[in-house]
């Protein structure tokens, strides 16, 4: 059985792990716990600072995020057929997970907690229908180091938090810098293009 608050922690949170995230700061555990008790979910990592005083938002333009896909992960630099999901890109995979579960479809904005380290409440976990968790388990059991793992990384926060109201969505969109990651249409010449594609989609 789940505790009232459960912390999900990957081995990559270890700063000495080969895939440790040097570009995110780890939040204080007590702060993560307090946020989780209040909101039902909290990410272990801070948002990436793009420029001094400006951080990458957890809220993503879902239409852009749907396009996210990878052909390899790591240092190979070439397409890895064993890695690639049979259902892609991310939006198609999430549609498959959500089908006939009764879970509301993503709205204009979708939250993402990168890194796979987060905390949530038992109530939030149980609010997700068992059918979806079984589908996720089946999908992630295909192999190790697969594209579906990156899709799930982009799903945890959205599945375990409540959908934004139309009013809150409008308020957030009023403050969007449309040159920001996940909202613009960055050209391949832009230095942020690879970062945007890795985070948000093509």
Image (cartoon, grey):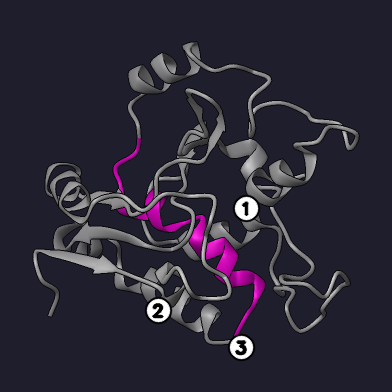
Secondary structure of the residue carrying tag 1 is helix
Identity of the residue furthest to the front in this view: 16
Give the answer, above or below, for where 97 lies relative to 138: above
Residue 99 visible, this orientation: no
Q: Label 1 to label 2, Cα distance in Å? A: 19 Å
- Which residue corresponds to mark 1? 91
Q: Is residue 183 above or below residue 98?
A: above
Q: Quadrant of the N terminus?
A: bottom left
Residue depicted at x 50% and y 83%:
138
Q: How busy is the neighbourhood of tag 3: few (under 14 within 10 Å), some, or many (20 plus)?
A: few
Mark 3 touching mark 1, by CB under 8 A?
A: no
**Quarter of the image holding residue 165?**
top left
Magenta stretch bounds: 143-163
Question: What's the CA distance linking mark 2 and mark 3?
Answer: 16 Å
Q: Residue at x 73, y 78 (%)?
A: 83
- Report how far apart the C-alphas of labels 3 and 1 lie in the structure: 21 Å
**Label whose residue precedes the other's in the sequence (1 or 2):** 1
In magenta stretch: residue 135? no
Q: Which residue is mark 2?
A: 134
| In the image, farthest residue toward the top | 174
In the figure, 105 relative to 168: above or below?
below
Local crowd size for mark 1, using a 10 Å CA cut-off: few (<14), some (14–19), many (≥20): many
Camera sees residue 144? yes
Residue 131 placement (x, y as % from top left): 37, 73
Which numbered disc flags the more N-terminal residue, 3 or 1?
1
Residue 153 painted magenta: yes
Dot 3 corresponds to which residue? 143
Judged left or right of residue 70, residue 45 is left
Q: Secondary structure at mark 2?
A: helix
Residue 95: image quadrant is bottom right
| Residue 73 picture location, percent across and down | 72, 70
* Nearest to the observer: residue 126 or residue 99: 126
């Amino acid at each position: 059985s789940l505790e009232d608050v459960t912390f999900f922690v990957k081995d990559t949170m270890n700063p000495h792990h080969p895939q440790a995230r040097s570009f995110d700061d780890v939040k204080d555990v007590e702060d993560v716990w307090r946020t989780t008790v209040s909101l039902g979910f909290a990410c272990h990592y801070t948002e990436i600072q793009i420029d001094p005083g400006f951080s990458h938002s957890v809220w993503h333009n879902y239409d852009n995020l749907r396009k996210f896909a990878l052909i390899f992960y790591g240092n190979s630099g070439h397409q890895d057929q064993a890695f690639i999901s049979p259902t892609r890109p991310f939006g198609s995979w999430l549609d498959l997970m959500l089908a006939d579960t009764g879970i509301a479809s993503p709205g204009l904005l979708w939250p993402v907690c990168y890194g796979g380290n987060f905390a949530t409440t038992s109530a939030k976990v149980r609010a997700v229908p068992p059918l979806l968790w079984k589908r996720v388990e089946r999908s992630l059991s295909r192999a190790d180091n697969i594209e579906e793992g990156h899709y799930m990384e982009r799903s945890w926060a959205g599945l375990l938090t409540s959908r934004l109201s139309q009013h809150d969505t409008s308020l957030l969109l009023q403050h969007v810098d449309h040159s920001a990651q996940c909202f613009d249409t960055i050209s391949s010449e832009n230095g942020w293009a690879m970062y945007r594609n890795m985070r948000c989609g093509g």
